[in-house]
Amino acid sequence: MRTLHHSPTLTSFTTTTTSTSSRTIKPQRITLIQPTSKPIKKIQKMINMSPLSERVGKRWKEYQGMSNWSGLLDPLDDNLRAEILRYGHFVEAAYKSFDFDPSSPNYATCKFPKTTLFEKCGLPNTGYKVTKHLRATSGIELPSWAQKAPSWVATQSSYVGYVAVCDNKEEIKRLGRRDVVIAYRGTTTCLEWLENLRATLTHIPCKMHRNHDSACFSTNNNNVGEENEAMVESGFLSLYMSSISNNPSFMSLQSMVREEITRILETYEGEPLSLTITGHSLGAALATLTAYDIRNSFIRPPLVTVISFGGPRVGNRSFRHQLEKQGTKVLRIVNSDDVITKMPGFVFDEVDKKCDDMANGEGFHVARLPSWIQKRVEEVQWLYSEVGEELRLCSRDSPYLKGGDIATCHDLNTYLHLVDGFVSSTCPFRSTAKRFLHR
């Protein structure tokens, strides 16, 4: 059995986004399942139909990626499938708790208090408690004329997700440890869309390196040199590290995460812990940055795992190497028909990869491209690299999905449907997977 690997792509970010940027910008969430007023019990029933994984305690490190999910992805292990879906529901809760109404005075905030968030979102029996709401702040400075625009246009800081801790004894026993979840939603506000368009790579600031003094000033250490070469997408980094300077209550997402994780590690010191960071779309990119930062910020961090759905590319090859050296485990769930996963920038194959493990119509081997093209892409800081392990799915494999528009292929519910239906690369789609789709 072989692990599913990403088929490299060569896609221009600007070409894909041209049509998007020409549309009228309005805050909304495009999903297969739009927020409705249907009774919450019906939503709960759908969630409860998802098979909870059996006791995973003895193998929890394996399911968290300690062995890079070797032998678990193709065919897809049933327990791993259930765990992926469980974390997907946490991301759903981040969406459902977001106030999407631009006419509301509470637009872009969390609609529910921490104590009832899961219950209000149709997840009453998670065994977790929300300990902190998280906000992301854009670093884009708007021109003066933007002050005359509707307030939602210039919303600079918005609710982006939450931190939750497993506090149920039975769930802790089933999982084999106390799990901490950080869940992020995808792009919703105007400034977040603008940040997404800042596709050039930028160097990671020194304060995100483990030994940031030596990382900034030393040139004798090879590892330090590679840290200095690690670069990530400008817009994602801005949303992670920006704060509102004249308002102390709006600290950066980075500061909020560090502060809460510090508190949790002190509270549960001595217990077996895991930290699972999950997100969809923009949230997947923020999850990867969060994992990188946590592994560098704490001397003895727990096992850090990223479960991402439909995430864009985040950084360059040096960034990927740093994640691997840290021991950060990343599982990317990718829909082959989702263009967001092919953005931003370009990806060239490593020279030592075999031709049959590379492009299947989407990418090009580095040897097939003239060196001047490669050099030019590097000069404009658009040369990205995929991170972690990949579970590659395809909308066309599902007999229940009709049509293949961009929104449907990228929708979180489509991802949950595809995970639920995938058996292996050689087996047909599971007939029971229809439950994630509402018609």
Image: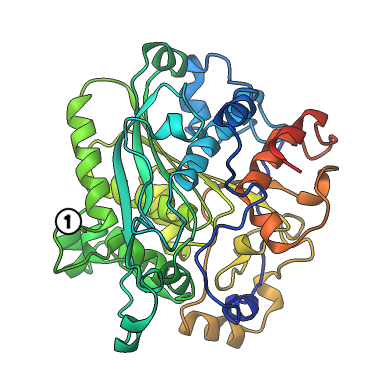
**At 44% from the left edge and 63% from the top edge, which residue is drawn?**
102
**Residue where numbered disc 1 is placed:** 249
Q: Between residues 42 and 341, which one lies in front from this camera angle? A: 42
Point out residue 307 in the picture as x, y percentages from the top left corner: 51, 42
Q: Secondary structure at mark 1?
A: loop
**At 83% from the left edge and 52% from the top edge, which residue is drawn?**
402
- Say above or below: 297 vs 192: above
Point out residue 206 in the picture as x, y percentages from the top left corner: 23, 64
Q: Amino acid at mark 1?
A: Ser
**At 55% from the left edge and 57% from the top edge, which residue is drawn?**
29
The N terminus, quarter of image: top right
- Say above or below: 438 vs 238: above
Residue 261 image-quadrant placement:
top left
> Is 69 positioned to the left or the right of 338 in the image?
left
Q: Is residue 423 visible?
A: no
**At 66% from the left edge and 27% from the top edge, which residue is drawn?**
77
The C terminus, quarter of image: top right
Point out residue 308 in the picture as x, y percentages from the top left corner: 52, 47
Q: Is residue 61 visible?
A: yes
The colour scheme applied to this rendered structure is rainbow
